[in-house]
Image (cartoon, rainbow, N blue to C red):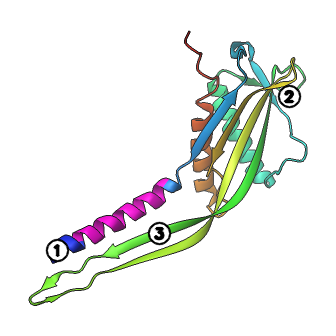
Amino acid sequence: MRVTSLFRLVGLISIAVVGFAIVVRAQDVNYNAMPGTDFSKFKTYRWVTVEGAQKPDQITDRMIRNSIDAQLAKKGLKKVDDASANLYVAYQVAINQEKQFNAYGTGGGYYGYRMGGGMGTVTSQTIQVGTLEVDMYDSAAKELVWKGQASKTLDTDADQEKRQKNLDKATEKLLKNYPPPAKKN
């Protein structure tokens, strides 16, 4: 194997490791819906709280609610503050820690009769991974009809602007699945 091919291979492996670290940080979204629910009957919603659920600080709480409100408005739902709501909406958050690996490499070259050395470095750091879970309840039937989760959504170490942008992206991605697509027979 030629020396330049070896350095090219080392460089490609370094790029692949960095790419993997970026992909690992991507938001994961999943949802589940009660079979047979007619979601077209839901026109209004109101916020409710889940007893015992972990809540963020007031600023983050407002950011989460505003982001979800914006997405639900796009779906045609109207927020109300009284018992007339046909849908109750609640959220919960969980903050966990995860290891993130960062890698980079520098290639060497061939200098006359000797090889130039390359070097690579892999570092790790602990990052906070925040999961946002949104629950929707049919107020008349008093049952859960839709549940969605977006992981890697809340980063307590990010500045407010980045945190809001990430949150908006996650709620848009999450609520893309509300109402759930109709099953084809």
Q: Which mark is residue 102?
A: 3
User: Spatial distance from mark 2 to mark 1, Cα to Cα?
Assistant: 68 Å
Q: Which residue is mark 2?
A: 81
Residue reaching furthest to the top: 185
Up/down of 163 relative to 71, above or below: below
Q: Quadrant of residue 28?
A: top right
Q: Quadrant of residue 66?
A: top right
Residue type highlighted by circle 3: Asn
Residue type highlighted by circle 2: Asp
The residue nearer to you, when weighing 84 against 181, is: 181
Q: Position of residue 123 (x, y in %)?
A: 49, 75
Q: Earlier in the sequence, mark 1 or mark 3?
A: 1
Q: Which mark is residue 4?
A: 1
- Residue 123 counted in the magenta span: no
Does residue 112 appear left or right of residue 25 in this picture?
Answer: left
Cβ–Cβ under 8 Å for marks 2 and 3? no
